[in-house]
């Protein structure tokens, strides 16, 4: 006995199939879409009163939860052949419903025409994203699109996309060019090097150096003058490994490069041509050289462990330019250790905030211990409020009871927010060390706390009775 289904829409379609004339394929698809939308279980009310024949509506339906609706929408889009649906078709190419996947993939391939090439370039990042999807093997589709865009007819437009403001698109274009072996000559590489994206330039140069047997002098010069140190470094290492000589006009530039690895590799490569240490000594004392060049020369002597380094660092520290003084201070701290403390204290008290900050950075690499009296002298004669903030960072490094003494003596000089912040920091430091104050510290604290009853109440649980 046959069971009659209770689905009204099914009965309606079955009945009219005998009474209505046959419809063309497109009209039939739209009729089925409308019937599916009218079913309550699909619940897509926002499209019921819109024109479902429009590409925009069909694109929206490709995101519907009902697989039959998605399939019909993709079928309708394939009949239209509109490139505006490319984004949704690429998404549907990874749909878990296999018929949708096959339809979308076929339609994407059908859209690969000359007039649609700009749209494929604009969506290249999304195309390549299919390679990260594991539901289907999208490699053939992506490879087909890549070959299409890298063909002679479209390669110029593809390369132009390297200058797109969209970072993901730029990266997708470069990887496509590399995979399709379109970085085959120096002109193609120069096109990438003209972009402002350091990531693109770095990837392109790495690829080029891995396959190029020899660099021309013009390309070598361009790479060794690239603003990004990584490109200069990789190029220099490549030349050293392959035994290529450095162009003579670049000898001076490489020895005075701001990157230490580049300076030292250049010194080794030019050891039979140039006495690098003598060259650096001349640069340091030459008024014709810039501050940046003199700093690089000073660091070059440090890396070479030149015997004249200490005397030249002392001479550089006596110069009026802050840039060379900062480099000299860092080197003197490295060479002298604790003996450099008076010079560091003087640098911290320098009216130039940038010079004081340079001294702080040097202490991060070569820490020194300061006494409470030394730090109080800095706080008492601070050149500016910003200097004071630097000094408090040093105060945090001393014994917690000395820190509290300094805090109580200079508490009125702090703003209310700084006062609360310093008290909170001290309470954290209190729990990190279990030492008690010495008798001298106890005596000073008793006197200072008597003058600050509010602070005493705030710290009563932390103070030794």
Image (cartoon, rainbow, N blue to C red):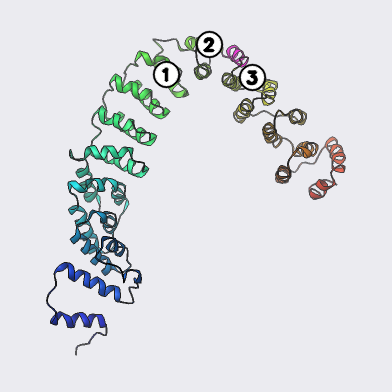
The span shown in magenta is: 309-319
**Nearer mark to the viewer, of 2 and 1:** 2
In the image, 168: left or right of 142?
A: right
The tag earlier along the polypeptide, 1 or 3, is 1
How far apart are the alpha carbons under marks 2 and 1?
Answer: 20 Å
Of marks 1 and 3, the one in the foreground: 1
Horizontal relation, residue 341 to residue 97: left or right: right
Q: Is residue 157 visible?
A: yes
Magenta-highlighted stretch: main secondary structure?
helix
Cα separation, mark 2 vs mark 3, equals 27 Å
Of the image marks 2 and 1, the number of the one nearer the N terminus: 1
Q: Which residue is mark 1?
A: 254
Give residue 153's quadrant in the image.
top left
Residue density around tag 2, few if under 14, some if 14–19, many if 20 or more, within 10 Å = few
**Residue lying furthest left:** 21
Q: Where on the picture, by quarter, is residue 308?
A: top right
């Amino acid at each position: 006995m046959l069971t009659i289904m209770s689905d009204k829409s099914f009965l309606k379609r079955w009945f009219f199939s005998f009474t209505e004339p046959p419809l063309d394929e497109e009209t039939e698809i739209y009729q089925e879409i409308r019937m599916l939308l009218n079913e309550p279980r699909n619940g897509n009310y926002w499209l019921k009163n819109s024109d479902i024949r429009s590409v925009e509506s069909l694109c929206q339906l490709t995101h519907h939860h009902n697989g039959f609706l998605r399939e019909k929408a993709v079928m309708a889009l394939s009949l239209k052949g509109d490139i505006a649906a490319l984004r949704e078709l690429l998404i549907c190419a990874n749909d878990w419903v296999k018929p949708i996947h096959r339809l979308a993939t076929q339609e994407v391939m059908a859209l690969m025409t000359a007039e649609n090439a700009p749209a494929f370039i604009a969506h290249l990042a999304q195309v390549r994203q299919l390679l990260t999807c594991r539901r289907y093997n999208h490699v053939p589709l992506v490879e087909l699109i890549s070959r299409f865009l890298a063909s002679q007819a479209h390669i110029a437009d593809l390369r132009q996309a390297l200058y797109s403001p969209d970072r993901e698109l730029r990266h997708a274009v470069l990887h496509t060019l590399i995979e399709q072996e379109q970085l085959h000559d120096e002109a193609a590489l120069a096109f990438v090097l003209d972009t402002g994206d350091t990531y693109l330039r770095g990837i392109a140069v790495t690829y080029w150096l891995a396959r190029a047997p020899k660099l021309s002098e013009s390309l070598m010069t361009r790479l060794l003058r690239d603003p990004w140190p990584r490109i200069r470094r990789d190029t220099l290492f490549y030349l050293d490994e392959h035994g290529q000589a450095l162009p003579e006009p670049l000898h001076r530039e490489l020895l005075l490069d701001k990157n230490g690895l580049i300076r030292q590799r250049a010194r080794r490569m030019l050891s039979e041509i140039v006495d690098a240490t003598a060259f650096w000594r001349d640069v340091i004392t030459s008024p014709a050289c810039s501050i940046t060049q003199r700093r690089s020369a000073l660091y070059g002597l440090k890396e070479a462990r030149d015997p004249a380094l200490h005397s030249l660092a002392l001479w550089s520290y006596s110069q009026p330019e802050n840039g060379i003084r900062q480099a000299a201070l860092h080197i003197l701290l490295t060479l002298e250790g604790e003996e450099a403390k008076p010079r560091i204290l003087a640098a911290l008290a320098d009216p130039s905030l940038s010079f004081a900050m340079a001294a702080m950075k040097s202490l991060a690499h070569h820490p020194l211990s300061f006494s409470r009296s030394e730090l109080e002298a800095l706080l008492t004669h601070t050149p500016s409020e910003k200097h004071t903030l630097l000094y408090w960072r040093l105060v945090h490094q001393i014994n917690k009871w000395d820190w509290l003494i300094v805090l109580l003596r200079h508490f009125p000089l702090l703003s209310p927010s700084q006062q609360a912040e310093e008290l909170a920091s001290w309470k954290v430091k209190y729990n990190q060390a279990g030492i008690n104050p010495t008798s001298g510290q106890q005596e000073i604290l008793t006197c200072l706390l008597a003058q600050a009853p509010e602070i005493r109440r705030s710290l009563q649980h932390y103070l030794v009775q």
